[in-house]
Image (cartoon, grey):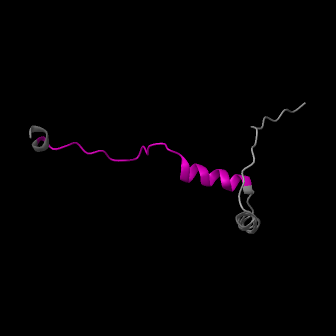
Amino acid sequence: MILIYMEKLVDIKIRREYRDILKKYCKENGLKMYALVEQLIKKNCLLEKPNNVLRSQPSKKLLSG
């Protein structure tokens, strides 16, 4: 017996016009609609701080006033 665990999916409401655009794009590029939406959300909506940012130290002149 093979068990496949799949997280519960939810519906999102979008206007038909945008659904059709998404559907056409995914069909032309061999993508699944839900997978593309998930990728776009991860890319554009996560609130994680970037970890590849160079931090600078304030100069001693600024610290001493």
Horizontal side, residue 11 vs residue 54: left or right: right
Q: Is residue 13 above or below residue 19?
A: above
Task: State the residue in front, 19 or 27.
Answer: 19
Residue at image position (70%, 52%) is 35
Q: Is residue 30 above or below residue 47?
A: below
Q: Is residue 50 above or below residue 13?
A: above
Expressed as whole percent of the image width and height from the top left, the position of residue 34 reads 73, 53
Horizontal side, residue 44 vs residue 3: left or right: left
- From the image, which quarter does the C terminus lie in? top left
Expressed as whole percent of the image width and height from the top left, the position of residue 16 reads 75, 64
Expressed as whole percent of the image width and height from the top left, the position of residue 29 reads 72, 66
Task: State the residue in front, 19 or 32.
Answer: 19
Magenta span covers which residues?
Answer: 34-60
Quarter of the image holding residue 63? top left
Quarter of the image holding residue 20? bottom right
Residue at image position (40%, 47%) is 52
Residue at image position (78%, 34%) is 5
Expressed as whole percent of the image width and height from the top left, the position of residue 55 reads 30, 44
Is-magenta flag for residue 49?
yes
Is-magenta flag for residue 45?
yes
Horizontal side, residue 2 vs residue 18: left or right: right
Quarter of the image holding residue 18? bottom right
